[in-house]
Image (cartoon, coloured by chain):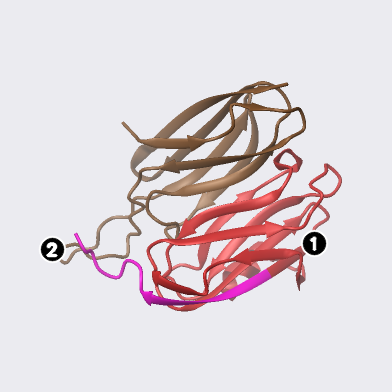
Amino acid sequence: MAGAIKAVVGAGTIREGRVKLDLPPLVENGNVVPLTVSVESPMTPADHVKAIHVFNEKNPQPHVFSARLGPRNGKAVIATRIKLADSQKIVAIAETSSGEFWSASADVIVTLAACVEDVT
Amino acid sequence: MTNVLINAPKTAKPGEIVEIKALILHPMETGFRPGTNGRIIPRNIIERFTATWNGAEIFRMEMSPAIAANPFVSFFAVATESGTIGLRWTGDQGFLAEEHVAITVG
């Protein structure tokens, strides 16, 4: 996960705050985990969130998604559903138009892990 | 044929921030799971989701195998002018789906 974050952030520094990561703390089924990322931002052409990246710690690959936004979005809020292979930490990073990086993280406990075997 | 469910308002006031929700039927096979014959099932995911408003891109999302099956995405957009919202999903094995919804602003 650290390597994947480094690839996105580069030499920039990541600060905690401004980002809110909403995830249930206890998940019964890791195949479908609702996730909402919201970032405090006026979303004007001068000051907006350019991108939101979400990473995980223990899935086979560290990436979850990378979204590109702009002032046309009005609100920097994204909701989706993800898969989690284990209890782990999720990190969301927002990149602003001024080149700042803000982050939030959440710990999730998963009782039934996603997609280890084919159940069909 | 693909099944797509889109939830977006039909009308909006100018400048209003509207929520657009999109759900598409897709297995999002990760490429890490062995099938019943013991072999790994090849990866088959949607890699990219893009949204346009009257042809101009407003939102884009790169997906990974960690997105749940039947990907659901919700995002917001400022209602600028009447027209169509275009949603497009592309992915592995030549997957392509496109849907349009009309919105009246005024």
Instruction: Provide residue A88's location: percent of width, then percent of height.
Output: 49, 78
The residue stretch that appears in magenta = A104-120
What residue did someone put label 1 on?
A100
Residue B37, numbered circle: 2
Q: Colour of chain A?
A: red
Reply above or below: B98 against A73.
Answer: above
Reply above or below: B82 against B75.
Answer: above
* Viewer-proximal residue among B50 and B12: B12
Q: Which chain is brown?
A: B
Pointer 2 indicates a residue of which chain?
B
Q: Secondary structure at mark 2?
A: loop
- Write the residue at 73% across / 28% down: B13
* Viewer-proximal residue among A89 and A36: A36
Q: Amino acid at mark 1?
A: Glu
Q: Is residue B47 magenta?
A: no
Quadrant containing the N terminus of chain A is: bottom right
Neighbour class for label 2 at 10 Å: few (<14), some, many (≥20)? few
Instruction: Provide residue B32's location: percent of width, then percent of height.
Output: 32, 65
Q: Amino acid at mark 2?
A: Asn
- Write the residue at 39% across / 68% down: A30
Quadrant containing the C terminus of chain A is: bottom left
